[in-house]
Structure formats: structure tokens, C-alpha cells
Image: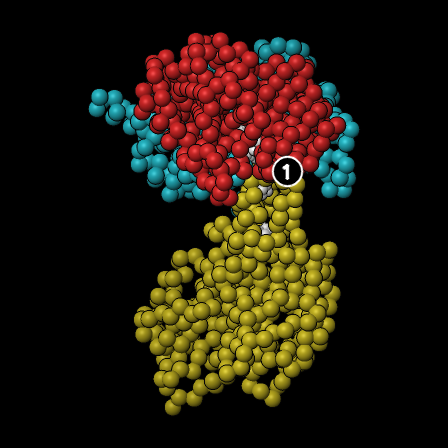
Chain colours: A cyan, B yellow, C red
Amino acid sequence: MAYWLDMDSFNGILKELSADNVVYAPVKMTGKGAFSGTDLVAYREISGVEQIEFKEKSRFSPKEIVFPITQTLLYFTEEEYAVPGTGEKGIIVFCRPCDVNAFKRLDEIFLRNGGRVDSYYRELREKVRFFVIECAESFDSCFCVSMGTNRADGYDVFIRAAGGGFLCDVRGDLATLFEKFGGPAEMSLRFIEENKTKVSIPESVDQSVFGHGIWREYASRCIACGRCTVSCPTCSCFTMQDIFYEDNPNRGERRRVWASCMIDGFTAMAGGHGFREDHGDRMRFKLMHKISDFRKRFGYNMCVGCGRCDDVCPEYISFARAINRVDALMKEAVENV
Amino acid sequence: MLDINTKKLMKNAYRITKHRGITALRVRVLGGGLDAGYLDVIKAIAERFGNGKVHITTRQGFEIPGIPMEKIPGVNRLLAPVIQGLEVEMGVGIADVNGGYPAAGTRNVSACIGNSVCPFANFNTTELAGKIEKLIYPNDFHVKIAVTGCPNDCIKAHMQDIGVIGLVLPVYDPGRCMGCGACVKNCRKVASGALEMVNYKVRRDHRRCLGCGECVLKCPTSAWTRGDQYYRLVIMGRTGKKNPRLARTFLEWVNEGAVLKVIGNMYGYIEKYIDRSLPKEHVGYIVDRTGLPVFSQEVLQGIELGSLGRAAGFIPFGGYTY
Amino acid sequence: MSNPYLPFRAAIIEVRRETAVDFTYRLEADMQVAGGQFVEVSIPGVGEAPISVSDFGDGWIEMTIRRVGRLTNVIHHLRPGNSLFIRGTYGRGFPLERYAGKDLIIAAGGTGLAPVKSLLNRYGGNPGEVKSLTLLAGFKTPADILFRDEIERWRRQHRVEITVDRDDAGGWPGRVGLITGLIAREPISQPENTVVIVVGPPAMMKFSTLEFIKRGIKQENIWVSFERKMCCGIGKCGHCKIDGAYVCLEGPVLNYTTAGRLMD
Ligand SMILES: Cc1cc2nc3c(=O)[nH]c(=O)nc-3n(C[C@H](O)[C@H](O)[C@H](O)COP(=O)(O)OP(=O)(O)OC[C@H]3O[C@@H](n4cnc5c(N)ncnc54)[C@H](O)[C@@H]3O)c2cc1C
Ligand code: SF4
Ligand code: SF4
Ligand code: SF4
Ligand code: SF4
Ligand code: SF4
Ligand code: FES
């Protein structure tokens, strides 16, 4: 069912939903960009639709809602430990189609990989309902069409900001609420059907390209800052940390924090032994994970083509171009056989 | 029969050159930035009245040499749009834009390019340069002021009577920190070693922090973000024959209001203590004579230092004498 | 909802000193273990680390832990009566069915002896399961030799060859030289019927494996055990991934046909 709502009626819905839900959306935070005079678009709890940034792409993805950057796993005293709860409320996430698809990738790792379920992730994930923001236009760096992630399914509401209000396609039990606040409308869903950036995913990548010179080039360019993986909606790596509180050394916590295969120390073992010290090897490892390794396990690619890694790389390394270069190398290899 | 009042000529921002009867005009370029269109005016003056050359000064102005002194009124008329655009429109009180610059003692307020371009800059330097110019110009007292976007000090604020350095208070959200250590390592390497890892999270020692904002730039997760804007004021740096030296910190972590007020107050201090038996006395030498406490007492009148702000009680200026 | 990260408390029943830096801990724990698998051992507030189960029996497991850092330093101060926190077991162990009736050679470097210890004990008790068993073990110096008592017992049951890289203190009656030398000299009568396990530091595993291949052992008859940084043990944290393989899931014991193709 589709409805049209003006700003006030939409806020009426948000107000009702807020009783039982925490609502997250991309928010533009003035002056919070890294450079002076720039803004940061990232996910925050909101109370009104006017807070939502509908135009710009968020620098960070909504993954932090279900996979927080820092998450306490256990609290402990000398004698016992306790698992923190996540509260009773549901979670509503306003995000774009690629990000909805990214959650599916996170689900593979946290709910299925290795046959064990990550209970911390599941507890938050099960509460999530998606309010999909329609992409009016593709951003320059997006390549969702190439990745087949331009369409979103599994949402409760699909929203188009139109004429000072919102046109919403509503599924499931929320229809009653929308009916109460909005008027009936017609809506046909629109998805981005073409991006400026296009990638061609190699059918298979084998180790014949591992020794190629492009990785040496990336080795000289990449500074291993990890921005690409941190902003990626599908990167799911983390590290464990155990601490005792400074003000109460008898108590402490075990927590996990995000980790990145691009950042030093990811493979470090006792005695200083590490693997993939070379930044080009890290770039290759990341790329293989995104467009090959994950697919071998789960049947589809990890990367959803959101383009954030390209947007944030301080060294102007384009991941999309890297994919295309590897694809060209593989095609060359096939021709030379 | 050339009869020139050299004092008036110099106040009009022309100078006495080694060539008799020939002068040079110094054009103020506030904060070092101007619309390219003004270059046409500079070019026209140089070609029509000067010798066709333009010299770029250390204080970000243009010096147009080779101008016969009797052409000054014509030059000033041609200059009017520059004074209108770069001074009057910035709020500087100049009654007659056709008469050339009304004063030259207080020099052009220079500024680095600031946050319109530079990733390190903590604020809009040109804007602040404009506010300062509005406050202190026209004035005959010999004062040099520069504004720089961050402690890299690309404008060499440390060589000025007053150097204004932009700071930002980094704000840390431990929940967003993934403990990558990039900020800690970088602060140690390029700034002040104000950061350390404690229990896998970062601790900032405010006493050692320069407010450069590098940690914000380095953080991949935006655990560090920009907090309030502050300034460091370094004072009494100078070149010259007597005791050249770098400016030292007088105020740190103060807001813009305090910066402007201190600069304004400084003119009152000069007024009160300048040695009028000399043709001119730079403010730095006045401070040498009166001592810092007298200077501080005068310029800190009515200043709110705020919760973070600090003023130096004693400054070992150093430098050297030839 | 079951929480895979929740450890349980396991009391330390016995501590044995192997070398100055390696101690064996016997814990009271009722777990299903296959030789070669590991557990995540932790002390809340200090840290968690993957450690191989070196031996196990009814209601107990043993681990041999080398002191190398934050957590293992603290573990080395624990005594019987203290406890450790454990979760697991994780990973794939040795596929015993593939060794049945074969000549089995185990090449272990340093602490690499720990993950194969349960295997040596098992075959000691059930010698009929394999046609023959040979242990080739290399240590840095005589002071680094682990499981001295067990080695003496194994000598009575299997062929055991020990070598040390250097004998700085002097007085070591045995062989001096790298383990690859032992492999080169090892009489292998039926290479096609011989299966091999190689466990140890990365360089030792690489060169030992190449040596076995040179000696005619087929790649599919070689198993190695990988060590990687691990934070979860259950395929979530991503640290242990090499190429497409998660060492905590598909390993740590891997057949060489897989392991040899993994590239960092
Ligand atoms: C499958 C497997 C089996 C192992 N079996 C044994 C064993 O039987 N006996 C033994 O002594 N050691 C074993 N190790 C190595 C052991 O895990 C490390 O020595 C231990 O993590 C060091 O922890 P630490 O806190 O004392 O050292 P630190 O250097 O302080 O370690 C810091 C962190 O780095 C990580 N780390 C460091 N080294 C390693 C490593 N080699 N492997 C994985 N993570 C590491 C851990 O996450 C640790 O929390 C095994 C490792 C793996 C992967
Ligand atoms: S790899 Fe880049 S484009 Fe692909 S999902 Fe991650 S951030 Fe987006
Ligand atoms: S690309 Fe790297 S950080 Fe991202 S999920 Fe893969 S291994 Fe983890
Ligand atoms: S963002 Fe760019 S420089 Fe940083 S790790 Fe990724 S590819 Fe390398
Ligand atoms: S602002 Fe500069 S000096 Fe202060 S903590 Fe950050 S990097 Fe260090
Ligand atoms: S750079 Fe950011 S994420 Fe890394 S340690 Fe510093 S605050 Fe934490
Ligand atoms: S140890 Fe975490 S994925 Fe293997």
C-alpha cells in the first residue's frame, strides 16, 4: 500500500514508533567533518524526519547499528561475569537499497559462517526494520547496478521525498499506522538502473594475478589507514579487548571493536610475526574478499557497490577501478592460454 | 620644483625610493586573497604610471615601483576600486576611496590560505584577517599582524607583533574508537605526543595538546571530531637589527572575541606608552621597555579567557643580538 | 539464546614445567576433543588466546602454553586450584581415518609438538591403528625440549628422532641440526603408503613440507597445522582468514593440497 504524508504527519508516525523503537537515520552533522568547515553524514538516532539527510551519501554505513564499533561482550567482577542486554526496543533504520543488501552480507558472516550464530549480532539484527530511502540519482562513485544491489527487498517502508512530503510504499503491519496519518497514493518503486561507475566482476580470480605489478603500485600508494574498510557496509572484522576499569581494578569488561585487514597488526602474532605486511598484499586480500572469496562461500559477492571506499580513500585509490583492472588481467590470462 | 611632504606621502602608502622623484605604491591585499579582477587594476597602474613591474611583498601585498611622484593623485584614483573592494567592503572605515590609503603604519594583515583550501586549517583565516583589519586600520602605529590556520604556521605568525594561530579542540568519542593507534602515532610524530593509549582507548593530555587537529584528520572512524574553535596568540616576534626573535605564546585556547579585544587594547597600550621622541617605535620595543606585566595589564582588560584559556605570566623572549 | 563467546570456568588440576617458558596445564573440563583442535583460553580483564589441546581424557584437557605476552604471562603465575576460562573446542583436528594402516611420520618443531601430543599418546595405546609411527622433533636448544618424560615413553613405542638447532651449553648427546636434515635422512620405504603431519613455526613447516615432497610423499598425504592470529575461533572476526579459508574453521589442521595453495 502507498501513502502520501507531509512532514508533520510523517513526524506523527515517527513519534508513535518511537515509543517502542529507536529510529536511526543518516544525519548531517555540521562542522563534524574531518576538515574544518565540512560536515559529517553518519548514522544517529533521530526524532524527526527533518533531521534525516536525504541528499548526501553517508560516510559511515548503518552497520554500526547492529555491529557497534565498540561492543561490550561481558562485564565481570572477580567472581562472576554478566552479559549486557540490548534493551526491549525495536530498531528502525533509514537507509538506501545498497545498505539493505549489505545487511544480508553481514548476516552471512555473523549468523551463518562456520555454523555458529553470533548472539550479540542476532539480538540487535532481529529488531531491525528497514525504511528504505529511494535513490533519486546515483552518486558518482556508486556501482550498485554492477553488483546487483540496486534493488532492495525485505523492507517495511520505501520512501520517496516528493513535493515537500513523502511518498511511502508500506508493507506489513505498519500499514495501519500509515493509514492513520497519511492519505492513499499511487507509487511505483524506482531503482537506479545505471551508474556512472561500472565494474566488471571477473568470473573467477586465481593466484596468477597475485604476483602482478598492480599490487606493487598499490603498495606504493596505500597508506594502510583502513578508511575503506571502516566505511564499508559489509566489512565485519573485529578484535577482542579485555580491560580492567581504571577506577575499579576489580571489575572489567571484554569487548570487541572493529578491526581492518588494511591496518597494521591485523595478523600480528606474539613475537611480532605478521602476514601481509605489504600494503599491496592487503589491497589484494581485501579485493579478493569482496569479489571472490565471499562468493565462493555464499554464492554472491560481498561488495554491494556503495562506493564509500572510493569516496573516503585519502590516497584516491579507486576500488572500482581495481576490480576492473583485475578483471582485465584475468581476461588477458584467459586469452593467453 | 618638486616639493613633497614625505611624511604625508609615506602615510599614503607610497615610499621614498633611491630614485629621486620616483615612488612605489604598496597595495594592501587583505589576508592575501583577492578576486582576480583586481589584478587588472594593479596591471593598469603598473603599466600606465609605473615601470611595468610589480613586486610581491612578504606581507602579501603588491608593490608597484617606478611611479613619478607627481602622478600620485592619478594613481590613487585608479586604485579606488581596490580600496573599495578590499577595504571598505570588508567594513574598514575609509572616507575617501579616491585619495589612496589613509595610513601605512599598521601593515596589511596577512593570512595563510586557511580552510577554503588547506586540509590542515582549523578555520577561515581570511575572514578573521578582515575582522582584524576592520578593527585596526587605518592606523599609523607600526604593527604587524598575521593569521594562520593551524600550528603549522605557514604564514609565519611567529615573525609578527601579533600572530593568531587557529586551534580546534578535539572531541573524542571512545565508543567510536577502534584503537587503531593512528592518532597516537601521528601526534607523537608530527605534533606533541599529547595522546596515549590506555586500556585500548585514547587519552589526551590537554596540557600538551597543540590543538592542531591532526588527530581528527587521521581518525578513520570519526572518533575524533572537531569541537570548539580556539586561538593561540603569539606576540612580539620580529626581524630587524635589534634582537630578532620568534614570537612566543601570550594566550592560548581563547576565543575570537578575546583575540580581537586584545588586539584592540594593544593600540590603547601603544598610545599610552609609545616614545614620541622617536620617528616611530615598533610595539615590540615598547614592550621591551615597559615589561610584559604592563602590557598584559593593558591588553587583558575586559578579556574573558574562558574555561580553557590561559595567559602567559612571563615570557622568556630570547632571540639574539648581533 | 546461546552465546558462543561465553567461556566457562575450568579449575587447574595440575601444572607441569616443561621448559623455562612452557608449562603444561591440566584443567578439569568435560569437552569433546579431537586431536589438533584448539580452545579459546582466557582470563577476564587480561585477554583471550587460542591454545591447542595437547592432551585430553575423561573430564580433563591439557594445554601446553608458552609465555609470550600479555595473557600467557599471567597464566604462568597460576597454580593448581586457580582456574582459567575456556570456550571451544574449535577447528578441525587430524583426520585419523586417513592415517589408518599407513606409515605415519610426524614432524614437529618446538611448541608444534603440543597439538600432536594427544596423537602420539593415542597411537602409543593403540599401536595397531597405524602401520608404523615415527616422530621427528626439532627444538632450538636442548633447554627447549618439551615433554621429556613423554618422549622417553614414546621412544619405547615408536621411532623417535630428536634434533636441536644449536647446543650452546654443550653436553647434548643427541643430534644437532635442522629438522629438515632428519627428514632428508629418514628411511621412507613406501612413500606412496606414507602419511605425514608437519607442525611448527611457519618457516619450519614450509621447508619440512618441501623436503617431504622431495622424498616422494604425495601432497594429499601431508597435513599441516596453521597458526594465525585469532580473536573469535568461530569464523566471525576475520583475523585468521587466508585467501578464502578461515583457519579457525577449516583448520588449524589442513591438508597440504589446500594449505599449499593458500597465499597471504
Ligand atoms: C590454533 C592455534 C593454536 C595455538 N596453540 C598454542 C599452544 O598450544 N601453545 C601456545 O603456547 N600457544 C599456542 N598458540 C599461540 C597463542 O595463541 C599465542 O601465543 C597467544 O595468543 C599469545 O597471547 P598473549 O596475550 O600472551 O600474547 P600477546 O603478544 O600479548 O598477544 C596479543 C594478542 O595477539 C594475538 N596473538 C598473538 N600471538 C598469536 C598467535 N600466535 N596466534 C594467535 N593469536 C595471537 C592474541 O589475540 C593476543 O590477545 C596457538 C595459536 C593458534 C592460532
Ligand atoms: S568494498 Fe567499497 S563499494 Fe564495495 S561495499 Fe565496501 S565500501 Fe562499498
Ligand atoms: S575486507 Fe578485510 S576488513 Fe573487510 S571483511 Fe574482509 S578481511 Fe575483514
Ligand atoms: S582508504 Fe585507501 S589508503 Fe586507506 S587503507 Fe584503504 S586503500 Fe589504503
Ligand atoms: S590536536 Fe594535535 S596536539 Fe592535540 S592531540 Fe590532536 S594531534 Fe595531538
Ligand atoms: S585514530 Fe581514531 S580509531 Fe584510531 S586510535 Fe585514534 S581515535 Fe581511535
Ligand atoms: S578466528 Fe575469528 S574468524 Fe577465525
The answer to whether C131 appears left or right of B136 in the picture is: left
Q: Residue at x 32, y 32 (%)?
A: A211
- Which chain contains the residue that carries disc 1? C
Pinpoint residue B71: horizontal percent, then vertical percent: 38, 77
Mark 1: secondary structure: helix
- Residue A20 visible in rendering: yes
Say which quadrant the C terminus of chain A sits in: top left
Residue furthest left in the image: A336
Q: Residue at x 43, y 9 (%)?
A: C101
Q: Residue at x 39, y 42 (%)?
A: A221
- Residue C244 visible in rendering: no
Pinpoint residue B53: horizontal percent, then vertical percent: 33, 71
Q: Residue at x 41, y 36 (%)?
A: C177
Vertical relation: C228 (above or below) B312:
above
Residue A47, quarter of the rendered image: top right
| Viewer-proximal residue among A104 and B83 | A104
The answer to whether B46 appears left or right of B311 in the picture is: left
Pinpoint residue B305: horizontal percent, then vertical percent: 71, 60
The answer to whether A202 appears left or right of B282 in the picture is: left
Instruction: Kindly tell me whether mark 1's CB lies below 8 Å from ligand 1.
Output: yes
Disc 1 crowd, CA 10 A, few/some/many (<14, 14-19, 20+): some
Query: Mark 1 is on which residue type?
Result: Asn
Residue occupied by mark 1: C73
| Viewer-proximal residue among A259 and A23 | A259
Q: Quadrant of ligand 6?
A: top right
Say which quadrant the N terminus of chain A sits in: top right
